[in-house]
């Protein structure tokens, strides 16, 4: 395990925050590559657990990013992974917000959105793939994941209940 | 009496902080839902159309779309101070909650029962993510190009494990150009 380098951690997440078009799940694979594979600051299983824990917390779905930083280097680490999301995205938002309010139906904006959506989807699928392999040790885990997908698509249940059911199934030794 | 035409209701910095705290703390499993409910229905700071436009714009920009919406709404009503207040409310509380979870995880994470619960929890969390992918994929146009770009992004980043910067640098210009040419 390398000694955590806060400056490098901050810069890498800053770079990722600019690439996170389509939301935080799209950059998860690269965080995993950086934190787990390149620097060994946490194991793949820890990474998946931290992601799962953050899903139980209130707030936007980027909170796992804070928890990754915290796991790597405590409070300073949490700041190093969380702050990058504010400054550049915020500034860019305001700049584009001004332009957008002047030309609301810009065709280029539509083309960008339409072009990037499939890439975001591919990246989110990659996130799911990486987490799935980190978590599910045998077929029962994969079955639970598959069952969750079906439940979300077929029922209007709140995801929190599904998470609670998953934790209970784990405690009962079913997974 | 001043600038009533474009800015709508008068909103204080404190109100921004409190309102976005409220949105984020009720935002279990889907903040956009609560953002709409509070901003459009309860506070009436935005019209339905303004909300949809801001959220769509937030999707186009890097970062989580609701965070971008938070910055834009805060800035619109109270300038930089408003943006800062809205963001502190929106991110501050969840940060404290997840770090508290992190402390507990570090202290008790190795207990067998906790470990089992985490395994089940994680398996479900992955399922939630994959279900989102399936839902979004269902509205992709029935053409081969978007699917090809999606698969290339998946294989490059998820399977071959190339750095995201390289994969996106290679794919985005083509994807945007293709969408631009294919526009109707």
Image: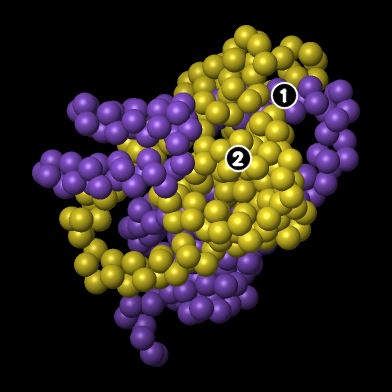
Chain colours: A yellow, B purple
Number of other residues with Cα within 10 Å of mark 2, as a class: few under 14, some 14 to 19, many 20 or more = few
Q: Is residue B31 left or right of residue A140?
A: left
- Chain of the residue under the numbered disc 2 shown in the image: A
In depth, the one of A170 and B21 nearer the eye is A170
> Which structural element holds mark 1?
helix
> Which structural element holds mark 2?
helix
- Which is more foreground, mark 1 or mark 2? 2
Q: What's the residue at 59%, 33% (across, down)?
A: A158
The answer to whether one can see residue B32 in this image is no
Q: What's the residue at 40%, 75% (across, down)?
A: B8
Quarter of the image with the N terminus of chain B in it: bottom left
Q: Position of residue A139 (x, y in %)?
A: 62, 9
Q: What's the residue at 33%, 77% (across, down)?
A: B6
In depth, the one of A153 and B91 nearer the eye is B91
Quarter of the image with the C terminus of chain B in it: top left
- Spatial CA distance of label 1 from label 2 is 24 Å
Q: Position of residue B111 (x, y in %)?
A: 88, 28
Q: Residue furthest front?
A: A2
Asked where in the image residue B174 lies, by quadrant, the reply is top left
B51, above or below B134, in the image: below
A153, above or below A99, in the image: above
- Chain of the residue under the numbered disc 1 shown in the image: B
The answer to whether one can see residue B174 in this image is yes
In depth, the one of A65 and A153 nearer the eye is A65
Q: Is residue A40 left or right of residue A30?
A: right
Judging by the rendered image, the residue that carries numbered circle 2 is: A38
Q: What's the residue at 58%, 43% (across, down)?
A: A34
Q: Position of residue B145 (x, y in %)?
A: 22, 31
Asked where in the image residue A162 lies, by quadrant, the reply is top right
Judging by the rendered image, the residue that carries numbered circle 1 is: B119
Q: Are marks 1 and 2 in contact (CB under 8 Å)?
A: no
Q: Residue furthest bottom?
A: B1
């Amino acid at each position: 395990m390398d000694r955590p380098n806060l400056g490098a951690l901050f810069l890498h997440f800053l770079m990722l925050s600019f690439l996170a078009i389509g939301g935080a799940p799209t950059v998860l694979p690269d965080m995993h590559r950086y934190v787990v594979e390149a620097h060994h600051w946490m194991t793949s299983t820890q990474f998946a657990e931290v992601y799962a824990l953050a899903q139980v917390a209130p707030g936007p779905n980027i909170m796992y990013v804070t928890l990754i930083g915290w796991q790597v280097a405590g409070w300073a680490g949490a700041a190093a992974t969380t702050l990058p999301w504010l400054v550049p995205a915020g500034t860019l938002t305001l700049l584009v917000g001004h332009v957008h309010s002047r030309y609301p139906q810009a065709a280029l904006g539509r083309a960008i959105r339409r072009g990037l959506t499939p890439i975001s989807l591919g990246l989110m699928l990659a996130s799911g793939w990486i987490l799935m392999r980190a978590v599910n040790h045998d077929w029962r885990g994969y079955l639970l994941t598959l069952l969750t997908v079906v439940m979300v698509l077929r029922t209007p249940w709140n995801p929190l209940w599904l998470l609670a059911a998953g934790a209970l199934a784990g405690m009962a030794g079913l997974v | 009496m001043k600038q009533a035409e474009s800015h709508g209701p008068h909103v204080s910095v404190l109100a921004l902080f409190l309102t976005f705290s409220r949105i984020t703390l009720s935002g279990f499993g889907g903040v956009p839902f609560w953002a709409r409910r509070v901003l459009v229905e309860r506070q009436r700071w935005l019209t339905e159309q303004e909300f949809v436009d801001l959220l769509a714009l937030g999707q186009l920009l890097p970062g989580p779309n609701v965070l971008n919406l938070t910055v834009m709404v805060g800035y619109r009503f109270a300038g930089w101070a408003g943006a800062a207040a809205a963001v502190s409310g929106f991110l501050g509380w969840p940060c404290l909650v997840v770090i508290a979870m992190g402390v507990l995880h570090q202290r008790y994470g190795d207990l067998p029962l906790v470990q089992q619960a985490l395994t089940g929890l994680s398996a479900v969390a992955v399922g939630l993510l994959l279900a989102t992918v399936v839902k979004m994929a269902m509205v992709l146009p029935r053409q081969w190009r978007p699917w090809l770009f999606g698969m290339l992004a998946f294989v490059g980043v998820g399977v071959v494990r190339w750095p995201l910067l390289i994969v996106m640098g290679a794919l985005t210009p083509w994807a945007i150009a293709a969408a631009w040419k294919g526009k109707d």
